[in-house]
Image (tube, rainbow, N blue to C red):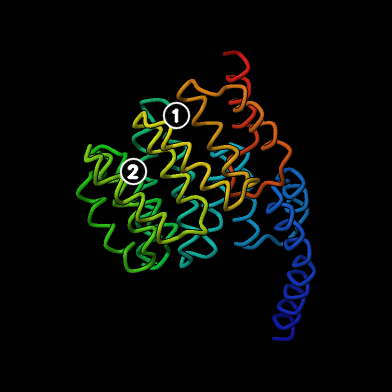
Amino acid sequence: MRRLVLWVALAAAAFAADAPLLERARELYNRTEYEAALRILGSIANKDSGTYLLMGQCQYMQGDVKKASELFLKAVGLKSGDSDYWMWLGRAYGRRAETSSFLTAPGYAVKARENLEKAVQLNPRNLEAISDLFEYYLDAPGFLGGGLDRAAALIKRVGELNPAEYHWAQARLAERRKEYQTAEQQFRRAADLAPRQIGRVIDLAKFLARAGRYQESEEAFRRAERIDANAPKLLFERASTYIRTGRNLELARELLKRYLEASLTPDDPPRKQAEKLLRSASSS
């Protein structure tokens, strides 16, 4: 019994000593300094579920989704009741499906769906997991468990949690069904319900650009500017929209350069993605 008590005490002391390292690594992660965060996380002797989760997130953000999925599996193995852990595992498998061969992609896609469904089952109010699962249902073919009917059924849950997100989801579904007038109405409703959320206005601007309504798209981008002209998301998405539609390439390059100099968070597109866009804009 004494040995057991001593072992428990030593283990508790070890985890307590690791806590500042984990917090420091999390700060670095939030500043997108993923390599530095991984170095600290690798030095932690007694890795718990939170350590493996953060290591997986760093690898995911750097594009190594194979390592990320392996680390998320370790996290889930240690803490199987956490909805967020299953969500990240689903995301990693989803990215592996996008980047793998046609032989292995279906298997990864199914795993992505199953893990996202598990995340929603564990926490029916996990809006991020619900949104990810909605996107899966929207994009995946029926033989992989996707489908517009499943996406539509999931929207009801979104409406109970976030009205603006609900109308955004309705817009995405309507656009996929080629009901463009309804889609526009829903995008505008989402933006009106969350007037300080720059992402909702950007969604509207991008939709209008996809429809070839460039002047109205510019008006929406200017509306987003009035919320926060230096928001990294605005810089990136506006540049991406210009490049995709073959317009304002010089301005797109300027926006991307500003983006690369900005302080980013994990919620922003990776710098590598912006660098790739900048190269494509420079070669046009």
The amino acid on which the numbered mark 1 sits, given as a three-letter code, is Ser
Q: Quadrant of the N terminus?
A: bottom right
Q: Is residue 195 above or below residue 271?
A: below
Residue 76 appears in the rendering: no
| Residue 270 locus on image (x, y percent) | 61, 38
| Front residue of 266 and 146 | 266
| Residue 165 locus on image (x, y percent) | 38, 58
Question: What residue is drawn where x is 68% and y is 54%?
Answer: 30
Element type where label 2 sits in the image? helix
Question: What residue is drawn where x is 78% and y is 66%?
Answer: 20
- Residue beneath label 1, please? 100
The amino acid on which the numbered mark 2 sits, given as a three-letter code, is Val
Residue 55 appears in the rendering: yes
- Residue beneath label 2, please? 110
Q: CA distance from mark 1 to mark 2?
A: 13 Å
Task: State the residue lying farthest toward the top.
Answer: 283
| Front residue of 91 and 102 | 91
Q: Quadrant of the C terminus?
A: top right
| Residue 130 locus on image (x, y percent) | 37, 57
Q: Quadrant of residue 143?
A: top left
| Residue 203 locus on image (x, y percent) | 43, 45
Q: Is residue 165 left or right of residue 33?
A: left
Q: Is residue 156 left or right of residue 59?
A: left
Q: Is residue 139 above or below residue 114?
A: above
Element type where label 1 sits in the image? loop
Q: Residues within 10 Å of mark 2 (few under 14, many from 20)?
A: many
Task: State the residue lying farthest toward the bottom.
Answer: 1
Q: Is residue 96 above or below residue 17?
A: above
Q: Residues within 10 Å of mark 1 (few under 14, many from 20)?
A: few
Q: Is residue 182 left or right of residue 20?
A: left
Q: Is residue 46 left or right of residue 224?
A: right
